[in-house]
Amino acid sequence: MVFIGGLVRGFTDNFSDVDITVILEKKDNQLRSRIRKMGFQKQKHSGVDIDLEVHFLEDFRKHNWSEIARWEFSRARIVYDPKGRVKKLFTEKLKTPRDFWVRRIVVCSEYLRWYCCPARKSEGTMAEAWVERGDLVSAHYCLSYAVDLLFRLVFALNKEYLPAPKWRIYYASNLKWLPHRFEAAMKEAMIVKDFSAKDFDRRLKAIMEIGAHARAKIAKETGLTPSLTSKYYVERILHQGT
């Protein structure tokens, strides 16, 4: 038996449900039906939404976990596992290749560079291209996409899986490392006062502030400068070595 969600995070309110995953060692459809029925009855009598999933161990092992599932199960609390098989399974499923986080950092960094955070002022960006084209709505959208990329990058720099969008801001504040003035700069970056060039510059400044701190962290943790990051992306992500 495994608890996930609010039962583990300690965050519950009127919008919360109870998330429980039960993993059966052997295939037994009758037992699975009984457990599901039990959950339905408890939900009916308590008035609390109960999200009860029942899986068979070997089938669960074959599941291709999504990013959100990885985030959830990396925080799960195993409350009953007498033979340790569920703990072993989780360890196997959550194991990542050695370069997993570096690859993610590189991809996010390159997209940020293209959209609005160039390593050098002489580099053009997609956001600036839309300003030149006179489409400030598209320019602001590029900045909004960059905000999402920054959240992805910050989680990766903490070697944390990415939570569902509804939890990203809330849990980003609890990460061990955050860029200097991250919360204040991110609030500034997220606000769209109007679709003007002046407001574009204000948001861009906040995004670039966060991006600069992230680049310094990347260089310190991985040794990748902006030019080496681009080289890594071309050779190891795109597999277009020269």
Image (tube, helix red, strand yellow):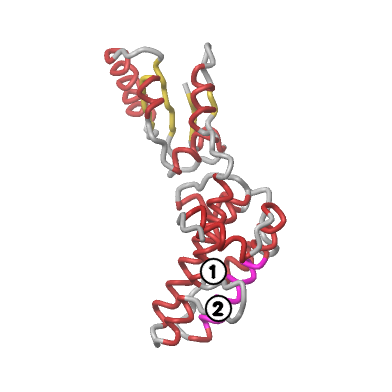
Viewer-side residue, 96 vs 143: 96
| Residue at image point 58% right, 50% down | 102
Percent position of residue 27, x then y: 32, 14
Q: Residues within 10 Å of mark 1 (few under 14, many from 20)?
A: many
| Residue at image point 41% right, 36% down | 65
Look at the numbered discs 2 and 1 and tell me whether their residues touch, using CB distance below 8 Å. Answer: yes
Per the image, is 99 magenta?
Answer: no
Residue tagged by mark 1? 113
Residue 9: image quadrant is top right
The amino acid marked with disc number 2 is Glu
Up the image or down, 191 lies above or below 21; here it is below
All told, the count of numbered labels is 2
Up the image or down, 179 lies above or below 44; here it is below
Residue 212: image quadrant is bottom right
Point out which mark residue 123 bears.
2
Q: Secondary structure at mark 1?
A: helix
Q: Residues within 10 Å of mark 2 (few under 14, many from 20)?
A: few
| Residue at image point 52% right, 31% down | 76
Point out which mark residue 185 bears.
none
Q: Secondary structure at mark 2?
A: loop
**What is the span of residues highlighted in magenta in the rendered image?**
199-212
Q: Viewed as shown, does residue 103 lie left or right of 182?
A: left
Could you tell me what secondary structure mostly forms the magenta stretch?
Answer: helix
Up the image or down, 71 lies above or below 211; here it is above
Percent position of residue 151, x then y: 54, 57
Task: Kindly give the residue lying farthest to the front in the view shown.
Answer: 242
The amino acid marked with disc number 1 is Arg
State the separation of the CA atoms marked 2 and 1. Answer: 9 Å
